[in-house]
Image: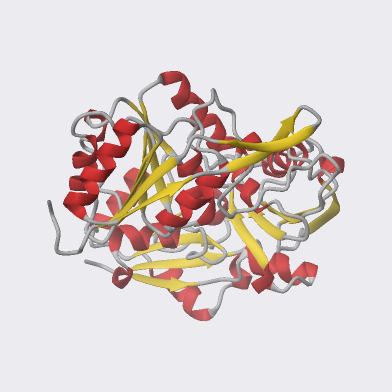
Amino acid sequence: MSVISVVGIGADGWAGLGEAARAAVLDAELIVGSRRQLALVPDCAGAKRPWPSPIDPLVDELANGSGERVCVLASGDPMLHGIGATLARRTGPERLRVYPHPSAFALACARLGWPAAEVELVSAVARPSEVVAPLLQPGRRIVAYVAGAGGAAGVARVLRERGFGPSRFVVLEQLGGPTERIVDGTAEEWGDAPAGPLHAVAVECRAGPEAALLTRQPGLPDAAYESDGQLTKWPVRAVTLAALRPRPGLLWDVGAGSGSIAIEWLRAEPLARAVAIEAKPDRANRVRENALRLGVPALAVVEGSAPEALRGLEAPDAIFVGGGLETPGLTAACWRALRPGGCLVANAVTLEGERVLQAARAEHGGALMRLAISHAEPLGRLETWRPQLPVVQWRAEKHRRSSA
């Protein structure tokens, strides 16, 4: 298989490329990039081919190899939310020779005097602007990659809707190029204004008086979720996420209800993935709405009843069962599907559910815990403790040699 050259190019165009990067372009028989990028390099022997929409067919073609010397143009650093990372996943890194250029992130931090190690980077390219939502805490600095003239307006909208309209809001256009332009204001001031087609957004978070201050740590307030009452309450949710131990990997949230466990798994670990399985269509829609509002639109939702709805899904690294424990065969199906080394956590509030968990512990081991939580509430002119329904939780890890 031939090696693919991946050349990062900035708004400074051909003049900003080093000698090795220029040689990779000039030596190519096929040059692939956006129309804007292709216009930045001189005409040479290689044919120029713009990316189609969607890009997947051409990525597949490049991954399969044509025998041609191929050069792919990328924006800035190809391995930072760029096409280089996509190609590396599809072809393997051994088939790539990458020539990075300073990224928009590095240039934005340089222009603003922000220490890059203290700045969060998020990409809203081909994703909803709501992906910035998990990062909105006072004092945090964010650089957001966006696409199209409306990119800045989308990020500003997300900030305003969540009470962060007073945040410093910097739109950086054509970074590193001869027409570089920087506009510094607030998210409220930016409104719905368009920006140049090539821009990034820098945010210094400042909360308004109505802002809901939500962290990425498990245990968001119950009011953060739309719910019909099928919601794991925040103290139990925090304990459950601690038992699941969010990490890079796939979670199944079985009987998702409002989706809170899967959502907080994703918020806690940027490299995590999750599937929410929910039988009722109205609840499944609510899971999607909660996921978007709380900044994890990548949460996949499967409508259907477990265990039947589990068939064909990718094997998970962790499973949470929050509903339907009494369904015959559900716990066994989840245990069979769990990858070796993964963990299963299940919560029960009924005696029937408890019996299922006791049987599962007898067969697979693990630990049982009973959570009894009470809240201080008025009793006439005084106060007393009002207990929630107790929750029994089972947590078990599947040994790496186990398959049953």
Q: Residue furthest left?
A: 404
Give the percent coordinates (x, y) of residue 106.
Answer: 65, 69
Query: Is 351 situated left or right of 116 in this image?
Result: left
> Who is closer to the viewer here, 376 or 140?
376
Position in image of residue 327 (x %, y %) = 25, 28
Give the residue drawn at x 32%, y 30%. 324
Quarter of the image with the N terminus is bottom left
Residue that appears at 59% across and 41% down = 374
Please give the name of the residue rendered at 26% of the width and 61% of the height, measured from the top-left corner: 341
- The reply to whether residue 172 is in sight is no
* Residue 176 point in image, percent of width and height: 70, 66
Expressed as whole percent of the image width and height from the top left, the position of residue 230 reads 49, 28
**Exactly how many numbered labels are in the figure?**
0
Colour scheme in use? secondary structure
* Residue 271 shows in this picture: yes
Q: Nearer the viewer, residue 22 or 82?
A: 82
Q: Nearer the viewer, residue 168 or 338?
A: 338
> Where 122 sits versus 237, above or below?
below
To which quarter of the image does residue 93 belong?
bottom left
Q: Is residue 189 left or right of residue 240?
A: right
Q: Residue visible at 14% across and 64% down?
A: 401
Q: Is residue 53 left or right of residue 380?
A: left
Relative horizontal placement of residue 124, taking residue 320 as reference (left or right): right
Q: Quadrant of residue 385?
A: top right
